């Protein structure tokens, strides 16, 4: 077991000092691209500033025969792109794959000073994070990197979900967690073949009409309500991340053409406490930017409650509702996010600045 104080010391001589806090940088959309796909790669420089995170993906969705091309493409993009306000992340191959060691030993010396976060797939427990923590420290020391790379874990096995708190606590590099609904569904033997999203078979049904004897009458129509297959896992992620000062993200939504359901799924995640979601296609960036930014109405309401509450204690009535010390804290969460996003998004700044309190 490590002492809490060990977390303040680098894991290799010459490696940068570990972070004490994970910076809250906007990351409404983590946009995935294959750096070995020439058409996608060519679009990356123009996407800088339009999306909070650009992620060069080396794992699943990159064919085995293209792994080296994608890795080399990522190095080229990293070296030649000025990322400005946009974060630059990568998803490396899984720790049991034949590619991951070359991913790490190539990327850290070549573009370790440009990368913000390394996303690690299929994390099973703290031992996986300890492995990455140590090897990153060694590679950072060797390459003379001055800023520690952060680590993001994808939850995509039952064991990973069961070990969620230990994973979050395993290293000061831990930046956040994403849901990996496709691999997680397979690992749990869930019977959905979708990449994220709901399922029409996972539902609750309105009660039946009943006869005078109390026996259900089965001939009337009964409304059904589709439920969220991922609610439990997302809720666990939110609690584990909040406990450890790191950030939860919804993962991918594979039905690219169903932009309405994508927006709904992202909004559920936003309401539950996630800070962002993955974008697999340019069309999903706009959805995530919209959903993970507080609406003007919400910001206005939050500012009104904060103004009405004065020093933040006691209870007041506003629009027929009780507000008190706890609800003002909720409102401060909303306003803090709005301010953080306004600092990097001029359209949001204009919209929030135009709010007039009644
Ligand atoms: C379960 C998981 O692990 S999820 C994470 C792994 N999966 C991924 O990373 C998938 C990333 N996305 C993709 O590969 C693609 O978007 C696909 C395969 C889903 C769809 O690709 P296409 O059929 O080419 O989509 P479409 O025809 O709508 O593309 C329109 C344009 O956007 C480009 N484009 C598509 N996706 C992306 C992207 N992620 N980034 C940048 N550009 C993209 C296309 O190259 C195309 O460019 P063009 O107009 O110059 O021809
Ligand atoms: C996101 C991912 O990798 C998965 O759903 O499997
Ligand atoms: Mg996966």
Image: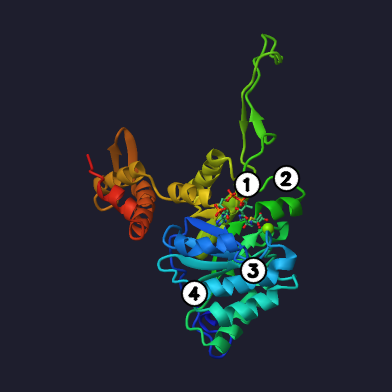
Q: Is residue 9 left or right of residue 298?
A: right
x and y percent of residue 63 in the render?
Answer: 72, 62
Q: Which residue is mark 2?
A: 193
Check disc 4 and report its element: helix, strand or loop. Answer: helix
Q: Nearer the viewer, mark 3 or mark 2?
A: 3
Q: Which mark is residue 70?
A: 3
Q: Which residue is mark 4?
A: 80
x and y percent of residue 245 in the render?
Answer: 49, 64
The image quarter containing residue 345 is bottom left
Q: Residues within 10 Å of mark 1 (few under 14, many from 20)?
A: some
Q: Which residue is mark 1?
A: 230
**CB atoms of marks 3 and 1 within 8 Å:** no
Q: Is residue 21 left or right of residue 1?
A: left
Determine if the C-beta at disc 3 is less than 8 A from ligand 1: no
Name the residue rendered at 22%, 39% in the picture.
358
Check disc 3 and report its element: helix, strand or loop. Answer: helix
Q: Earlier in the sequence, mark 3 or mark 1?
A: 3
With respect to residue 62, does 305 lie above or below?
Answer: above
Q: CA distance from mark 3 to mark 1?
A: 31 Å
Residue at the farthest right position: 189
């Amino acid at each position: 077991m490590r002492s809490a104080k060990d977390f303040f010391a680098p894991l290799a001589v010459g490696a940068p000092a570990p972070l004490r806090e994970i910076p809250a940088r906007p990351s409404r959309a983590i946009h995935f691209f294959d750096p070995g796909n020439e058409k996608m790669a060519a679009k990356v420089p123009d996407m800088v500033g339009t999306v909070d995170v650009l992620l060069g993906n080396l794992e699943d969705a990159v064919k085995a025969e293209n792994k080296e091309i994608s890795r080399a493409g990522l190095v080229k993009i990293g070296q030649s792109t000025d990322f400005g306000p946009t974060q630059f992340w990568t998803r490396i191959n899984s720790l049991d794959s034949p590619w991951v060691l070359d991913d790490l030993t190539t990327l850290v010396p070549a573009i370790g000073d440009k990368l913000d976060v390394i996303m690690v797939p299929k994390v099973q427990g703290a031992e996986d994070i300890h492995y990455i923590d140590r090897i990153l420290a060694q590679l950072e020391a060797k390459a003379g990197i001055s800023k520690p790379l952060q680590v993001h874990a994808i939850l995509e096995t039952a064991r990973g979900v069961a070990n969620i708190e230990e994973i979050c606590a395993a290293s000061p590099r831990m930046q956040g967690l994403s849901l990996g609904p496709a691999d997680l569904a397979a690992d749990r033997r869930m019977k959905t073949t979708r990449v994220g999203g709901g399922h029409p078979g996972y539902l609750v049904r309105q009660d039946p009409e009943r006869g005078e004897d109390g026996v259900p009458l089965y001939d009337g129509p009964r409304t059904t309500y589709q439920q969220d297959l991922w609610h439990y896992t997302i809720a666990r992620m939110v609690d584990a991340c909040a406990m450890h000062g790191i950030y939860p993200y919804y993962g991918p939504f594979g039905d690219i053409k169903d932009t309405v359901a994508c927006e709904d799924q992202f909004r559920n995640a936003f309401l539950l406490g996630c800070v962002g979601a993955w974008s697999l296609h340019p069309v999903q960036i706009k959805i995530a930017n919209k959903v993970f930014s507080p609406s003007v109405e919400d910001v206005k309401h939050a500012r009104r409650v904060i103004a009405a509450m004065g020093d933040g204690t006691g209870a007041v009535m506003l629009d027929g509702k009780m507000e008190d010390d706890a609800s003002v804290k909720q409102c401060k969460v909303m306003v803090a996010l709005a301010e953080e996003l306004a600092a990097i998004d001029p359209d949001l700044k204009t919209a929030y600045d135009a709010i007039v309190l009644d």
